[in-house]
Image (tube, rainbow, N blue to C red):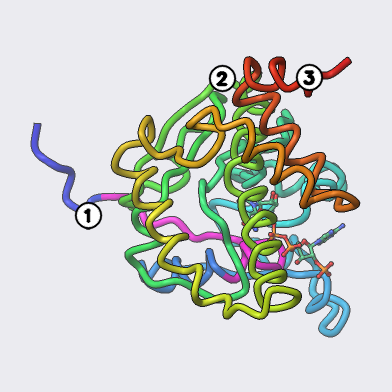
Amino acid sequence: MGQVPQNSLPLLKYGIVGDGRVARHFIAYLEQLRLPYAQWSRKAAAANGITVEERLADCDVVLLLVSDSAIEPFAQEHPALREKRLVHFSGALVTPLAQGIHPLMAFGPTLYGPEVYETLAFVAEAGPLKFHEVFPSFPNPVFEIPAELKPRYHALCVLAGNFTVVLWRKLFEEFAGRLGLPAEAALPYLRRIARNLEENPAGALTGPLQRGDLATVTKNLQSLEGDAFQEVYLAFVRACAPALAEKAGLSKP
Ligand SMILES: NC(=O)c1ccc[n+]([C@@H]2O[C@H](COP(=O)([O-])OP(=O)(O)OC[C@H]3O[C@@H](n4cnc5c(N)ncnc54)[C@H](OP(=O)(O)O)[C@@H]3O)[C@@H](O)[C@H]2O)c1
């Protein structure tokens, strides 16, 4: 079967609720795709008095791009929005009030180019509303998971995506601080780790845990005495190298 021509796809208008990071990124993407949208935020409403129902009246799809804790209360307080195709982007929340479609990406303060937005994957929870009914003209890869697997899916994203940021920020701060090293010195190392993970995840781990080098692990742990990250290091030894932890008497009592 041939590809559906772009111009035969329904042209939907998007209503964006919120003006945080994801709302800014998603609006940038909609503009790149030349798709129509309207935005409502409580800050703008406080200034102009326009309600969300008024502002998004002619939108087909409403994206609740607000904090996770605000998604359900907002949908409950605005039942008219539930008559539209109502979607949220939370990776952790499952609610019957809106369809969850999670963009698997880190949205920071700086906007990205089209190549980033167009290639990011959306992970949709299985539900009544399908990705193509919400984003029919989007070129992105999309995957579906059962709603009950979402908590696990999101925990993995946080562990891998967010916690590595915490670890790298720790290195940058200590390089620039007590070690007097430029943070940029670590960038080729960071890029290579990402590249190795991409190219060969099974071979990407290097260092004392991979080698089973107990003497170095012990020295590393001693150097972190009094630092909360000593516990983090220990948790990695226990999770990634239980036999080594056992041998060193580092297993949990
Ligand atoms: N950031 C990411 O990398 C990322 C990635 C994937 C998915 N997501 C998901 O995207 C959604 C938005 O996240 P974000 O990073 O954009 O958050 P954010 O930058 O903290 O922005 C939150 C937005 O929600 C609004 N808000 C909070 N409570 C509200 C309420 N009761 N009524 C109306 N508006 C309210 C805030 O308005 P005020 O400024 O007025 O408080 C702000 O516009 C979340 O579901 C998040 O899980 C985020």
Question: Residue 74, percent across and down?
Answer: 83, 50
Q: Quadrant of ligand 1?
A: bottom right
Image height of 123 relative to 6, above or below:
above
Question: Residue 110, percent across and down?
Answer: 56, 76
Residue for badge 3 = 249
- Quarter of image, res 206: top left
From mark 3 to mark 1, how far is it between C-alphas?
62 Å
User: Is residue 83 one of those drawn in magenta?
Assistant: no
From mark 1 to mark 2, how far is it between C-alphas?
29 Å
Which secondary structure, mark 2?
Answer: loop
Q: Which mark is residue 6?
A: 1
Q: Earlier in the sequence, mark 1 or mark 2?
A: 1
Q: Nearer the viewer, residue 208 or 186?
A: 208
Q: Nearer the viewer, residue 52 or 158?
A: 158
Residue for badge 2 = 146
| Direction from residue 44 to residue 191 in the image, left or right | left
Q: Amino acid at mark 2?
A: Pro
Q: Is residue 126 visible?
A: yes
Mark 2 neighbour class, 10 Å CA radius: few under 14, some 14 to 19, many 20 or more: few
Which secondary structure, mark 1?
Answer: helix
User: Is residue 19 one of those drawn in magenta?
Assistant: yes
Q: Nearer the viewer, residue 211 or 120?
A: 211
Which secondary structure, mark 3?
Answer: loop
Question: Residue 39, percent across and down?
Answer: 64, 70
Viewer-nearest of labels 3 and 1?
A: 3
Q: Is mark 1 within 8 Å of ligand 1?
A: no
